[in-house]
Amino acid sequence: MKNFWETLPKPFFALAPLADVTDAAFRRVIAKYSKPAGPAVIYTEFVSADGLALAPEEGRAKLMRDLVFSEEERPIVAQFFTAIPEHMEKAAALAAKLGFDGVDLNMGCPDRTIEKQGAGAKLTLNPKLARELIAAAKCGAPGLPVSVKTRLGYNKDVLEELLPVLLEAEPAAVVLHARTRKEMSKVDAHWDRVKRAVEIRNEKGSKTLIVGNGDVKDLTDARQKAEESDADGVMLGRAIFGRPWLFSNSQEYENILTKLRILVEHTKLFEELLGDIKNFAIMKKHFKAYVEGFPGAKELRVKLMEAENAAEVEGLVEEFLKS
């Protein structure tokens, strides 16, 4: 099986994994409206490898729904979190069986419940275990490229110590969120450290791709950051909110009618694909993003926040468009 990372044009632009955001419904909308180019790589939301290995049948079935994808989303990477190599190996094997194009280890999530397991951002304190987890993923899915998404460190920047250990495992790519866990999103991303990561990679003679992440506003900004940092690619996250067409770099969707029609389409898809296992309230963060910057937006947004299903959302939007 060919390593898709090796075929990507440089710089390439990837869609970040965002919990309760880049679910199956939103990814499908993004894949549709970001054509013709689209994201060069799409990630799933993170999925618990421990849950897949240990959860009872009902719980495992719910987790499996997070691993449903459409052909339009390719290349698509399954992201897992765990601190147990055996579980990572099993999750990677499952990803290969399901037809994913790659596997990713989450080393950046700051969620306390995940950190208590020694996973997510806590792994920046234990690079040797992270290296073992990458190796385990490779063992579980020998035909798939394995990448890792990490931060600069936990309480402090330890890039100089962390990255060389990760590179020893020869991941296909390292996505670097250019902040520490402690910094969260309270400070600007340190893109000079992405540049340093590229330098470290080159000094080690590694073939691992370096992908920068943090505070990327749009594709123009992404290109500029790639040029300044020499990164092979750039990952965009929060910029996708309310703009599923972001990767098309097109202005044709930047009008009220189209934005609201896409909102309705997105909401219906969420209900169709995930309505039986996820709370409809998850869509409300999207309503905030889609419905802003035009006359009457605030009033419509207030009404949408009270909606309980896709039919109500569609009715409110149609009523607004007629007014």
Image (cartoon, grey):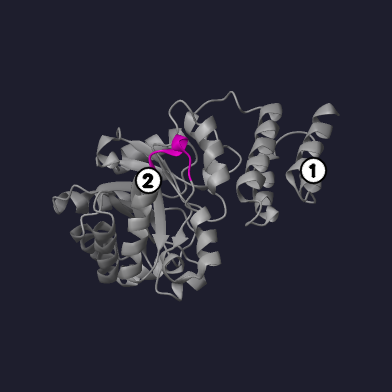
Q: Amino acid at mark 2?
A: Gly
Q: Residue at x 41, y 45 (%)?
A: 235
Viewer-proximal residue among 36 and 203: 36
Tag count: 2
Looking at the rendered image, the quarter that the N terminus falls into is top left
Q: Is residue 84 magenta?
A: no
Q: Is residue 107 visible?
A: no
Q: Secondary structure at mark 2?
A: loop
Q: Which residues are magenta?
A: 69-76
Compared across the picture, whether 271 is left or right of 83 comes to right
Viewer-proximal residue among 195 and 102: 102
Mark nearer the N terminus (1 vs 2): 2
Residue 209, image x, y percentages: 26, 46
Circle 1 packing at 10 Å, graded few (<14), some (14-19), many (20+), is some
Q: Is residue 243 visible?
A: yes
Residue 99: mark in rendering: 2
Residue 171 quadrant? bottom left
Residue designated by label 1: 312
Residue 288, image x, y percentages: 68, 46
Q: Amino acid at mark 1?
A: Glu
